Amino acid sequence: MAVPKEVKVVPSSLIDALVKEAGKRLGEVTRAFYETVMPPVDVYEEGSQVVVVADLAGFPKDKVKVRLVGGDELVIEAERDLQTPANASIQQRPKRVRRSVKLPAKVKSEGSVAAYENGVLTVKLPIAESVEIKVS
């Protein structure tokens, strides 16, 4: 095996800088991913209403917004200020999230309620024209 005649040594400070920069870039991509897939949402029917539960831990209540679109779509948006030290890389804490949820039934806005407690948003929406039929 031939031994190279000249070997260049890369300074460790340059390698450290490259690794740090790669970590930042990966963090940006990871954060973008979490902003796209979050928040995790559960949707189910309970009696004559549709219930939507979203995990929004770390988002302040006054920055959480919920909209009903067309009677069958719920849009959840939230944002927060993240104070990041200059040398830190925060990868899995999105600054903002937006999630559009297709509802299993048409709902009405009248009588809808939303509560935000301990980082969990719960929205209850009455199903439009839902009538219970007595079976005899």
Image (spheres, rainbow, N blue to C red):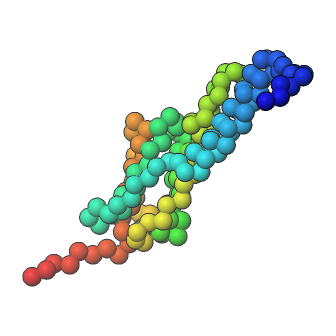
Near-viewer residue (131 or 46) = 46
Q: Is residue 88 above or below residue 93?
A: above
Can I make out residue 123 in this image? Answer: no
Q: Position of residue 78 (x, y in %)?
A: 56, 45
- 132 versus 90 height, above or below: below
Relative depth, front residue between 42 and 52 = 42
Q: Quadrant of residue 132?
A: bottom left
Residue occupying image coordinates x 50% and y 48%: 39
Q: Residue at x 68, y 31 (%)?
A: 23
Q: Residue furthest front?
A: 1
- Taking the view exactly as shown, the residue that stands out farthest to the left is 136
State left or right for residue 105 relative to residue 61: left
Note whether residue 50 is visible.
Answer: yes
Q: Residue at x 54, y 54 (%)?
A: 99
Q: Position of residue 4 (x, y in %)?
A: 86, 25
Q: Depth check: give the residue in front, 117 or 91.
A: 91
Q: Residue at x 47, y 69 (%)?
A: 72
Which picture quadrant has residue 113? bottom left
Of residues 130 and 72, the one drawn nearer to the viewer in this rendering:
72
Q: Quadrant of the N terminus?
A: top right
Residue situated furthest right in the rendering: 6
Seen in the picture, residue 60 relative to 35 is either above or below; the reply is above
Could you say where residue 34 lies in the image, as x and y percent from the top left? 57, 45
